[in-house]
Every structure is written in C-alpha cells, then in structure tokens.
Amino acid sequence: MSKSRTRLLTSGPILCFSANTIHSRLALAPDLIDPATFTSVRVVSAAILLSLGVLLKSRHFPRLGRVKPWSVMAVFLYLVFFSFAYTRLGAGTGALVLIAGVQLTMFCVGLVHGERFSVLSWTGFGIAVAGVLYLLLPGATAPDPLGAALMAISGAAWGVFTILARGVGDPEEANAINMLWCVLPTLLVNLAWLGDVHVAPSGLALGIASGAIATGFGYIVWYLALQHLSATHAATVQLSMPAIVALGGVAFLGEPLTTRLLLASAAMLGGIALVMTQRAGGRR
C-alpha cells in the first residue's frame, strides 16, 4: 500500500476517535441524554455496525463463543467511565487525561513484564507524570477531580484492552464480539441509574453517531491502518488526538484553551512521545 493511502487510513480513525469525544460532550454537557443511556446507545450502535461488517466480510455472524472475558471487561469499563467522566470534564482536558492513562498504563505493564527502558525513556516518563500532576493541581482552572479520576480509569482500561488485543487474528470479529458482550452489562448500568434516564432526540442522535460512526466505523478503518503501521507508530499517532479534540472543543463547544492545559499537554505528550521514540530505537 502506498504511503499516501496509509496516511489516509491513519488519519480517518484518529478523526473518528476525536469526533467521539466531541459527540460525547455535545450530548452530555447540556444534559441532552444521561451518561448511562448514552453508553448503551453507543454500544448497541457499534455492535450492530461491527456485526454487519463481519457478516459482509466473512459471510457469518460474530461467533460469540470466542469471547475473551478480560477484553470485554476492559472495554466495558472504558466505555462506562468515559461517558460519566465527560459529564464533568471539558473535551480537551478529558482527551488529554484519557491518552495519558492509556500510554502510562502500557508503559507500566511493559515494566512489570520485564521490558527494559533507557535513561531517556525514564526521563520522558517523569516529564509525562509531572504534566499529569500539574494538570491536576488545585486551582481555578484545575479539572474536576472526580471527572479526572473517572477518565483516568477509562484510559487505564483502554490501555489494558489494547495490550490484550495484540495478536488478534481477526480484529473486526473480535471487536464485534466484545461489543455484543458489552450490551447486557451496559443495559444493567442503565437499570441501576433508571431514575436518571432522560433522552432528547438530539442526544439519541449523537449517541448513535458516536457508536456507529466514531466507534464502529473508526475501529474498522483503524485496524485496516494497523496492517501497515508498526506498533510504535500506531501508538505515537494517537498522541495527536488531544490536540485535535482541544481545537474541536474550541470550535464546536466554545471551550477555552487555558495556559494550564497547554503546558500540561506539552509535558505529557512530549514525555510520552520521548518514551515511544526510545522504545522504537531499542527494538530496532
């Protein structure tokens, strides 16, 4: 595949994942839909689209018996905590905490499993952690502590899911299976928050768009791109998402770009990028 087509395939899902955050904030910030129902709508929409993708590609429905329970649990926790976090966080801040949670979790898992890191990698890790601490310091522009904690859990869950998903033979079917198995638990979350259920037509539409387009379609194109990207390039390219989301938050949600967010972004993303570069160099 040509480099131009690979870039196109790569930019598509990153824009979809960024749009997912914008959709979530557009729906949840003005309370057009409650977070539990938004999650259910997103999961059901994504499950339908991914299942159709498997049917068209392989001429059979996703084989639910091939489920990996830990993967389902990880993606379920990511989805639920993501929605509840975005009732309390701005788009840019939420995306930054999410990506930091993903990358730092994967760094720590690599460390526990015996992966060795250079001095520059540890320096980058320290810079990224300092960025996280600076972002969360008390102050007028500090993010909501509970919202940040929920998003950090969501990011950690996605990091674990990413690690568990490595080496999957059929990513499209694996993701369809995960989403189908997530339907029942998300509906149970809805029952637990039954008293808070409310859905405006625009909130429902945003939930469907988040699931079918930003999640379902985004996953399909992302796995097509992964066939032509190294693991390090795939991880590094995701670091562009917080910047795209922050700009989208300014354009579509009227959210401010604070000095704290900009400085924390530079430290966190720069530190993580340094870790990624050193890990790529060590593997080569």
Image (spheres, rainbow, N blue to C red):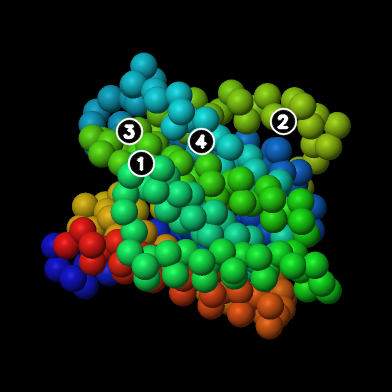
User: In percent of the image, x 72 and y 60: which residue is there?
Assistant: 89
Residue type at numbered disc 3: Glu
Mark 3 is surrounded, within 10 Å at the Cα level, by few (under 14), some (14 to 19) or many (20 or more) other residues, namely many
> Mark 2 to mark 3: distance in Å?
26 Å
Instruction: Identify the image quadrant of the N terminus.
Output: bottom left
- Residue with the most extreme top position: 65
Q: Which mark is residue 190?
A: 2
Disc 1 residue crowd, few under 14, some 14–19, many 20+, Cα 10 Å? few
In this view of the protein, which residue sits in the foreground, 222 or 47?
Answer: 222
The residue labelled by disc 4 is 74
Q: Is residue 262 left or right of residue 12?
A: right
Image side of residue 45 versus residue 80, left or right: left
Residue most toward the bottom? 259
Extreme residue in the front direction: 119
**Which badge, 3 or 4, is on the more N-terminal residue?**
4
**As drawn, 156 above or below 73:** below
Disc 4 to disc 1, C-alpha distance: 19 Å
Q: Do we see residue 141 in this rendering?
A: yes
The residue where tag 1 is placed is 113
